[in-house]
């Protein structure tokens, strides 16, 4: 049960946050808060996401928390923050922070992105162990686990439903292939919406993840389903969503360093 929930939390970390905030056609991010229900086998949990703006800088943060028996057993959360800007329709990360007390790779990751020097520098600190220095070459397009989803949705708003994306994940770069998955109707808070499906799969992986995004809600994903060898393993369902006002500089800095 713990293994399935840890995977669900990491899945939502890499997917949900960045899929909550694009306006169809306008290619404009929206400050928001959203809450999702996680289900992975017998495990249950909650994902809360927040996107704030300060000038031309965006601060995206989410927290994945196990509930019920899973919460009693694991006793940890995953808390991630990505700070980025949008330049010429491309998202450029400025910093990334991950505090993971839930998965098998428990620890802390801190990265600063220098696009002029084409290098990301930072540290990886395992739960039990010393900090290790990181130096990652930056060859665009390259994203962290959160910002890649904003780029995906930016492209989806332009009716681009397929492509190849590169994502930095701790010590490796993963290649994700995106493809269209059709359409369906979904109910959200008692209302019925048309949804567009996009599926992604990492190179060499047997897992596929389908995101059902609602154009009428700014391409918000109302449902995320992850399968392995055709069997449903993880389901992430939208529960609540609200737009927010822009934050001031002090709030933005606090979010990015917490």
Image (cartoon, rainbow, N blue to C red):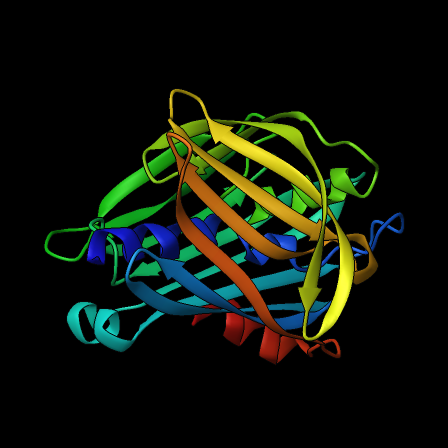
Q: Residue furthest top?
A: 204
Q: Residue at x 77, y 31 (%)?
A: 160
204 sits to left or right of 184: left
**Residue 187 coordinates in the image, percent (x, y):** 69, 64
Q: Quadrant of the N terminus?
A: bottom left
Q: Residue at x 14, y 51 (%)?
A: 130
29 sits to left or right of 17: right
Front-most of residues 219 and 246:
219
41 sits to left or right of 96: left
**Is residue 189 in view?**
yes
207 sits to left or right of 20: left
**Residue 67 coordinates in the image, percent (x, y):** 32, 75
Determine which quarter of the picture holds residue 157. Answer: top right
Q: Residue 211, relative to residue 32: is it above or below?
A: above
**Is residue 117 in view?**
no
Front-most of residues 241 and 152:
241
Q: Residue at x 50, y 47 (%)?
A: 225
Front-most of residues 2 and 118:
2
Q: Residue furthest right?
A: 26
**Residue 115 coordinates in the image, percent (x, y):** 59, 36
Q: Quadrant of the C terminus?
A: bottom left
Count all numbered tags in the image, as a single digit. 0
**Residue 18 coordinates in the image, percent (x, y):** 60, 53
Determine which quarter of the picture holds residue 132. Answer: top left
């Amino acid at each position: 049960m713990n293994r399935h929930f840890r995977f669900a939390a990491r899945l939502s970390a890499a997917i949900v946050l960045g899929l909550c905030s694009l306006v169809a056609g306008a290619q404009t991010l929206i400050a928001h808060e959203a809450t999702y229900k996680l289900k992975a086998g017998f495990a249950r949990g909650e994902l809360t996401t927040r996107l704030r703006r300060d000038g031309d800088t965006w601060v995206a943060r989410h927290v994945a928390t196990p509930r019920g028996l899973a919460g009693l057993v694991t006793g940890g959360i995953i808390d991630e923050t990505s700070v980025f800007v949008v330049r010429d329709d491309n998202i450029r990360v400025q910093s990334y922070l991950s505090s993971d007390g839930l998965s098998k790779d428990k620890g802390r990751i801190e990265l600063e992105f220098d696009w002029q020097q084409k290098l990301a520098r930072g540290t990886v600190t395992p739960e039990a162990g010393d900090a290790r220095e990181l130096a990652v070459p930056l060859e665009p397009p390259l994203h962290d686990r959160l910002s890649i989803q904003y780029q995906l949705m930016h492209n989806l708003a332009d009716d681009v439903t397929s492509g190849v994306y590169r994502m930095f994940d701790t010590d490796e770069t993963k290649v994700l292939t995106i493809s269209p998955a059709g359409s369906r109707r979904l109910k959200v808070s008692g209302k019925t919406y048309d949804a567009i499906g996009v599926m992604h799969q990492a190179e060499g992986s047997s897992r596929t993840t389908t995101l059902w995004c609602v154009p009428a809600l700014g391409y918000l994903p109302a449902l995320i389903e992850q399968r392995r060898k055709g069997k449903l393993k993880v389901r992430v369902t939208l529960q609540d969503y609200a737009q927010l006002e822009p934050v001031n500089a002090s709030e933005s800095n606090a979010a990015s360093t917490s």
